[in-house]
Amino acid sequence: MNISEIQGEIIRLKKEKDICILAHSYQAEEILEVADFTGDSYKLSVDASKAPNRTIIMSGVRFMAETCKILSPEKRVFLPNPDAGCAMADQMDKELISVVKGQYPDYTVVAYINTTAELKTICDVCVTSSSAVEICRKIENDKILFIPDCNLGAYVAAQIPEKTFKLLSGGCPIHACVSTDDVKTAKRLHPDALLLVHPECKPDVCAMADYIGSTSGIMDYAIKSDCKEFIIGTEISIQEHLQYRCPDKNFYYLSKKLICPNMKSTTLVDLYNCVSGKSGEEIVLPSDTISQARKCIDEMIRLGSN
Ligand code: 13P
Ligand code: SF4
């Protein structure tokens, strides 16, 4: 089968089997084309909870599929490629954060959504890159222990100077490897382009940006902008998606290092095999993990929608 034939089969099978396909913006273009919902982690987590279908396939990485399961425990949730983890989510576990919490007992523990379901069970509030500033501002406590991404944490802390943030040294190894030299090189090559970056980049890189935001935030900004050229400082798939959506504009990636092997590990064929019932992993979580982790995700949705 060629690409469009596989896509046709996926669309036919998902209707026949009442499956909702969610795809994170870092997935390949041919996957986004067959998804029911696409977007950043926050949008997908809300879309997943509202979808009427009995089965959800989360084309993204493991923590995203776990989030879907936590929000919709009555549904069957599948991850098309079981190897699709997240280097950041794997950095900190429940044991480590339990010890840190003991050192900062009067701090509210804010967990970036890029954390395991198990770790979320001991956190107070979850955030995504698009909701982190708003939610941290609304939290009543002025002391925040922000895990695991120190770059996103530093970005949020800079927007809310009246609060005290404790950060740990975690983060996305893909975004963190971009340097100010990469920015200087890209700006020299494309002097008229605006620089749009994800807050998982280092603070000195973010300081050189014209816009800082989530994957969806970056895409919306570029689509709506009157500017014709953009340097994209996040996973390179976003540069490709934008080029499809806006053929009259030019998009350049900030660095060739911005490739997430976990996001790239899911292919259209993996998705086809998952919809067909031939492969993919069903996400199974203990019921107490679901109920405890749900508290901090519900808190995110409550604070994010107020
Ligand atoms: P978003 O929250 O912007 O979707 O980002 C998720 C992610 O994994 C970024 O590396
Ligand atoms: Fe995780 Fe980084 Fe990949 Fe995002 S880009 S999924 S944070 S490893």
Image: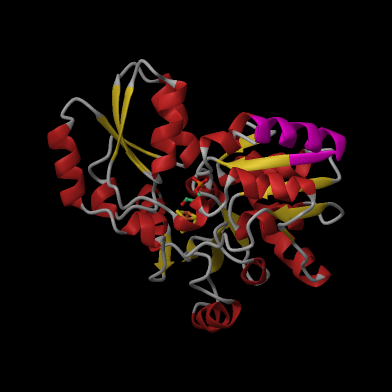
Question: Which quarter of the rendering shows the C terminus?
Answer: top right
Measured from the top left, where is residue 205 in percent x and y?
Answer: 25, 49
Vertical side of 170 occupied by 294: above or below: above
Assess whether residue 116 is covered by the magenta stretch.
Answer: no
Residue at 27% from the left image edge and 39% from the top image edge: 209
* Residue ranking furthest to the front: 1
Is residue 304 in sight in this rendering?
A: no
Chosen colour scheme = secondary structure
Vertical side of 16 occupied by 165: above or below: below
Question: Which secondary structure class fits the magenta region best?
Answer: helix
Residue at 43% from the left image edge and 22% from the top image edge: 223
Nearer to us in this view, 27 or 273: 273
Instruction: Name the quadrant containing residue 294.
Output: bottom right
Assess whether residue 6 is covered by the magenta stretch.
Answer: yes
Measured from the top left, where is residue 20 in percent x and y?
Answer: 76, 40
Nearer to us in this view, 292 or 205: 205
Is residue 133 in sight in this rendering?
A: yes
* Residue ranking furthest to the left: 188
Left or right of 40: which side holds 58?
Answer: right
Question: Which quarter of the rendering shows the N terminus?
Answer: top right
Measured from the top left, where is residue 233 in percent x and y?
Answer: 33, 43
Measured from the top left, where is residue 260 in percent x and y?
Answer: 43, 54
| Count of numbered tags | 0
The span shown in magenta is 5-20
